Image (cartoon, grey):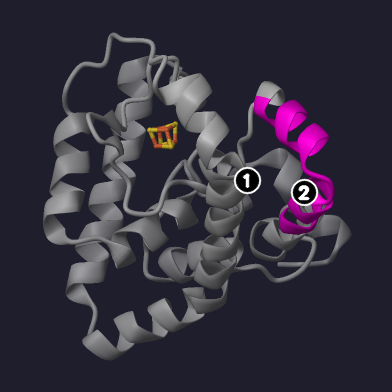
Amino acid sequence: MSNNDYQKEQLETLVEVSRHLETISLSEKQQLKAMTADYLSFRKDVESFQSEYFGEICTQKCYESKLSACCSREGIITFFADVVINVLLSEKQEIEALMTVLQKPNNGSKCVYLGQNGCMWHLKPIVCEMFLCDQAQKTVFGEKPGTETIWEELKQRKKQYTWPDRIVLFDTLEHYFLNAGYSSPLMYMHNSPGLLRVKKLAQIK
Ligand code: SF4
């Protein structure tokens, strides 16, 4: 997929989600937010773990050297639910900034969402949050006993929201928007052959 196609897909989904969330009642919006509460608490735990054990090494090895390897990939995977949750949490200006950047050409080798102050998402996509480069993992897991186990536990917890061998938030949010008449190529719970197979085996509709 070209950069253009990627950005178009991202922009269309962002516009669609934002428009819908602007039209629904406050109570419906509150219900959606309540659905994400448990997931957000999981995200806080991941963030605390990352900042406690990886903050220093990531700053030294990556950001200060301007390598920023985590965000050097073009076209990172964003789930539809990532977009929904981010819009629910964002201020209007934050969404507008994302829309603006998605309409500019991105010829560089970095993620389109990487701004001057880091990631422009209010809550970055789950794929980014769960990314630790091999070098950082090797150093931290080698030096701090027990950290690898905690990380593995967090990876398992992530599945409770994203792996559709049961009813998961990421699938539920797609259902909600599909029922409201929207669809998006980012609805991987409904269009990824691998994830559809997982759902079929678990008899999840
Ligand atoms: S979305 Fe944010 S965290 Fe993820 S690669 Fe892009 S800039 Fe980095």
The earlier-in-sequence mark between 1 and 2 is 1
Q: Quadrant of the C terminus?
A: bottom right
Q: Is residue 39 left or right of residue 95?
A: right
Residue 186's x, y, as percent? 48, 44
- Distance, label 1 to label 2, CA atoms, is 8 Å
Query: Is residue 117 placed above or below 146 in the rendered structure?
Result: above
The answer to whether mark 1 and mark 2 are in CB contact below 8 A is yes
Is 90 on the left or on the right of 148, as rendered? Answer: left
Q: Quadrant of ligand 1?
A: top left
Q: Secondary structure at mark 1?
A: helix
Magenta residue span: 136-154
Which residue position holds label 1?
Answer: 53
User: What predominant SS class does the magenta segment belong to?
Assistant: helix
Residue nearer the viewer, 193 or 57: 57
Task: Please name the residue that numbered disc 2 is placed on.
Answer: 147
Q: Which residue is at a point 45% across and 63% down the rendered structure image?
A: 178
Between residues 205 and 149, which one lies in front from this camera angle?
A: 149
> Which picture quadrant has residue 41?
bottom right
Look at label 2 and name its amino acid: Thr
Residue 64 lies left or right of residue 56; in this view the side is: left
Is residue 158 or residue 16 the one in the foreground?
158
Mark 2 element type: helix
Relative to 199, say whether 55 is above or below: above
